[in-house]
């Protein structure tokens, strides 16, 4: 854990980025944090501006009731902040949260551009270091849905069985993940900001269409039925799935699985992937034998979680039987090689519970499973 006595001011402390930043700063041992939100007294901000050694200026307005509030919130409050720093001759580094829309001619963009210009003038006047970040669409946990983030809205609505509206599925979006933003901001705190000309930026940007985002999130919801998990090798898909889970209704964290039950025990599939195989739980009743089959290409791993048992192998075309005694008292994985017929015998007095992995999901049209007693 990092330890620091640096006094850090965070404006917009209750906002999406602010909450994530403050939480991670505390995780890393930064405990002298001045948290300021616009509903607090300006006298408190004055005190903070006297003491702080670094400023994360994250406060802003992006969904006001009238357009005049854009300039008041994004330019006016920035002006107040900088005036208070000048009042106390505090030349702490100031990081400012701006937007890629600052390059556009709309009320929000113009207000952000005005804030940027003010920040640059402040730096020239005082010599203080300023870091202006033009963020694109930021997504991740704790972002308010049905407000100004399409990802948050889609995640919340799909998770809660509410409708979504995709105006243009081919519309391209550039997105950055909140954890990548926070890593960059903490690097900036240490003087290691990622610069691009006059501005700073998060290097890990993802480009994807609106329709693709919607379809991915729908597939996340369906995964509880299909048991398919997202492609974790795809960085964006991994981050989007993590975001989706943060919007699950609190009474729906759990979900049932289909247990295939007979007098021998049960078999329950947990997760399936197209490239990393299938994960299941196999329960064998006392005295029962399961298996007596072999595979050409399908291979498996067995891990006994509880109970006692015997796993037996015989190579096809030979007579020798190989015995492996297994128990939940010892965490030991047994590989099930191809070309060996095998079975599992519960030798104990309680259920034998086995966690199983197969290198491919079961396909009833090509099961690659051939009955043959060990």
Image (cartoon, rainbow, N blue to C red):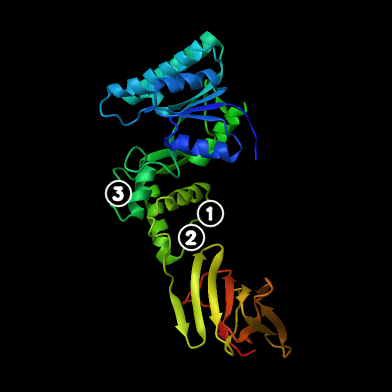
Sequence-earlier tag: 2 or 3:
3
Q: Secondary structure at mark 2?
A: loop
Q: Report which residue position mark 1 lands on.
A: 232
Mark-to-mark CA distance, 1 and 3? 25 Å
The quadrant of the picture occupied by the C terminus is: bottom right
Q: Report which residue position mark 2 lands on.
A: 229
* Residue 242, visible in the rendered structure: yes
Q: Residue at point 72% right, 91% down? A: 319
Say which mark, if any, is on residue 149.
none
Q: Report which residue position mark 3 lands on.
A: 164
Mark-to-mark CA distance, 1 and 2? 8 Å
Vertical arrangement, residue 199 with respect to residue 127, above or below: below
Residue 44, x across and y down, in percent: 44, 23
Mark-to-mark CA distance, 2 and 3? 22 Å
Tell me where residue 83 sits by quadrant: top left
Looking at the image, do the residues carrying marks 1 and 2 touch, with CB atoms under 8 Å apart?
A: yes
């Amino acid at each position: 854990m990092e330890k620091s006595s640096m006094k850090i001011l965070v404006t917009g402390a209750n906002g999406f980025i602010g909450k994530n930043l403050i939480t991670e700063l505390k995780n890393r041992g930064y405990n002298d944090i001045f948290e300021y939100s616009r509903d607090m007294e300006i006298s408190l901000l004055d005190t903070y501006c006297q003491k702080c050694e670094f400023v994360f200026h994250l406060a802003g307005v992006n969904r006001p009731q009238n357009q005049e509030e854009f300039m008041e919130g994004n330019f006016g409050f920035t002006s107040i902040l900088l005036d208070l720093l000048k009042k106390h001759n505090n030349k702490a580094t100031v990081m400012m949260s701006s937007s890629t829309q600052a390059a556009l001619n709309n009320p929000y963009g113009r207000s952000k551009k005005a804030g940027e210009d003010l920040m640059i003038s402040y730096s020239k006047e005082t010599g203080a270091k300023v870091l202006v970040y033009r963020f694109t669409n930021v997504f991740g946990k704790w972002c308010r849905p049905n407000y100004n983030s399409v990802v948050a809205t889609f995640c919340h609505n799909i998770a809660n069985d509410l409708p979504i509206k995709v105006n243009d599925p081919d519309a391209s979006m550039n997105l950055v993940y909140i954890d990548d933003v926070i890593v960059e901001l903490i690097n900036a705190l240490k003087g290691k900001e990622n610069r691009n000309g006059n501005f700073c930026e998060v290097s890990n940007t993802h480009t994807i269409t609106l329709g693709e985002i919607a379809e991915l999130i729908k597939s996340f919801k369906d995964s509880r039925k299909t048991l398919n998990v997202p492609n974790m090798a795809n960085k964006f898909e991994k981050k989007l799935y993590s975001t989706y889970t943060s919007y699950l209704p609190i009474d729906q964290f759990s979900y049932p699985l289909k247990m295939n039950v007979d007098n021998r025990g049960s078999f329950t599939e947990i997760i399936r992937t197209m490239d990393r195989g299938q994960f299941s739980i196999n329960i064998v009743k006392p005295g029962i034998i399961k298996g007596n089959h072999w595979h050409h290409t399908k291979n498996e791993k067995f891990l006994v979680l509880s109970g006692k048992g015997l796993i037996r192998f015989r190579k096809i075309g030979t007579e020798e039987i190989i015995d492996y005694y297994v128990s939940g008292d010892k965490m030991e994985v047994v590989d099930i090689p191809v070309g060996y017929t095998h079975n599992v015998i519960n030798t104990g007095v309680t259920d034998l519970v086995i966690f199983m992995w197969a290198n491919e999901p079961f396909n009833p049209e090509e099961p690659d499973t051939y009955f043959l007693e060990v």
